[in-house]
Image (tube, grey):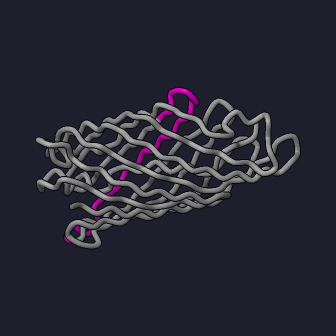
Amino acid sequence: MHAKWSLAVAPAFLLGSMASAEPYSGVAFAGGAASDGVSSYAGVVNALPGSRIGKGLALRLLASGGTYNYESNGVGIHGRFAASEAALVYQFSGNWGWANFSGGPRLTDVRLSPQDLANDRRGTRMDLALQSDGAVQMSQSWRLGWLGSVGVRDGTYFSRADLGALVEPRSQTRVGLEAGLQGDPSYRAANIGLFAATHLGRTLEGRVSAGANGQDHRKTRPYGTIGISFLF
């Protein structure tokens, strides 16, 4: 089977460590990824009454889109997608780290040129998206993070794990290794790379990563991602 998506975008709460220490009510985030295609996202998480970022219930709104390329029966296909989702999030946090669990509807629109009738992801589809993300503070320096997302109807999945070390405490700069898997019933892909994350201000954090992305029946390609988040 041939890959039908570029490197997926699945944002986590980049500022979860800060959120556990301050009573913020929301976080805005944006970013993107590039490999054989490009994708971008932007969203916001806002705590519901009686909660705050890091503890209790929150609502997440997310919009994403991008382009990708693949082959079907020897024909090159160019795809464009746009997606939006809303999710109810339950958050935990403490000295140990943080964890978020969420679920809600996802609406995706896929346009292909030329048309590929064998691709059952074309057109507009509704799905139920489930996600978990978080991190565990393993020691004063080392942190293990994760992100996992699935689309129940379409069988899509995205997962990422990263292990980072604190190299500059004042700016909370971390560098480390990340690895991920993604796919659906028609393809699977894996990536491995390095990442760096740092506070750019009291409530602003940025993250970049780069590495190699491999898909079934395709050459390994480089990838890069960038993300930023802001607590309010």
Is residue 164 rendered magenta in the image? yes
Q: Main secondary structure of the magenta part?
A: strand
**Quadrant including the C terminus:** bottom left
Camera-nearest residue between 59 and 100: 59
In this rendering, the answer to whether 115 lies above or below 120 is below
- Residue ID at (20%, 69%): 202
Does residue 118 appear to the left or right of 223 in the view shown? right
Q: What stretch is highlighted in magenta?
A: 150-170
**Image location (x, y in percent) of residue 71:** 80, 46
Residue 34, by quadrant, is bottom right
- Residue ID at (23%, 43%): 98
**Quadrant including the N terminus:** top right
Does residue 30 appear to the left or right of 73 in the view shown? left
Camera-nearest residue between 106 and 8: 106
Does residue 211 appear to the left or right of 29 in the view shown? right
Residue 119, by quadrant, is top right
For the image, the number of numbered tags is: 0
